[in-house]
Amino acid sequence: MSSDETDDDEPGVYNVRKQDWRSTKLVKMLAKINHRRPVVNKYGNNKPGARARTRKRRTGNARESLRSAPAGKPSNFYDEAWFASLDKKGKRDLEVKPPMEFLMEDVIS
């Protein structure tokens, strides 16, 4: 899930907030997967439902999300520097699982 906020300059456009706990490798993989998501059905028509939001991911000046990191994720989902900055209780509370192999290594690069 993303934390979104509306863009004051462009109505209908949402800025994605930065989640410091996420690893850059995971963010790149999720962005590629979202970009490859089909928006039409097999007949070439738009898929039913509400139109997807237009989102912008700002690189340098993105605001931080206020959400806390979810517990129970694989260790390579968390940013290494962020994880190292946690105290012992914070690391224990995350209940980190063993790292997960990213099957889409070619997609991330």
Image (tube, grey):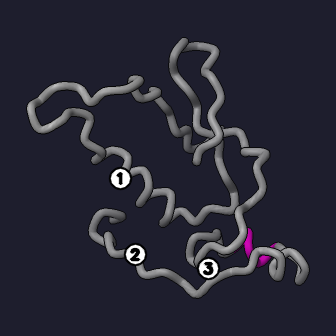
Residue behind mark 1: 32
Badge 3: few (under 14), some or many (20 or more) residues near its Cα, within 10 Å? some
What is the number of the mark on residue 102?
2
Mark 3 or mark 2: name the one nearer the start of the chain: 3
Callouts 3 and 1 close, C-beta under 8 Å: no
Judge whether 86 appears above or below 88 on screen: above
Mark 1 or mark 2: name the one nearer the start of the chain: 1
- Residue 38 image position (x, y, % from top left): 25, 41
Residue 97 in magenta?
no
Under mark 3, the amino acid is: Ser
- Residue 20 image position (x, y, % from top left): 69, 57
Residue behind mark 3: 75
Magenta stretch: dominant secondary structure: helix
- Residue 3 image position (x, y, % from top left): 65, 40
Q: Which residues are magenta?
A: 81-85
At a point 50% along the width and 57% down the height, the residue shown is 27
Q: Is residue 88 left or right of residue 60?
A: right
Assign a secondary structure to mark 1.
helix
Assign a secondary structure to mark 3.
helix
- Residue 6 image position (x, y, % from top left): 62, 22
Query: Between 73 and 43, which is closer to the camera in this rendering?
Result: 43
Distance of label 1 from label 2 (alpha carbons): 13 Å
**Quarter residue 47 falls in:** top left
At a point 73% along the width and 61% down the height, the residue shown is 69
Query: Between 105 and 68, which is closer to the camera in this rendering?
Result: 68
Assign a secondary structure to mark 2.
loop
Q: Residue furthest front?
A: 48
Distance of label 3 from label 2 (alpha carbons): 12 Å
> Which quadrant is the C terminus positioned in?
bottom left
At a point 62% along the width and 34% down the height, the residue shown is 4
Under mark 2, the amino acid is: Phe
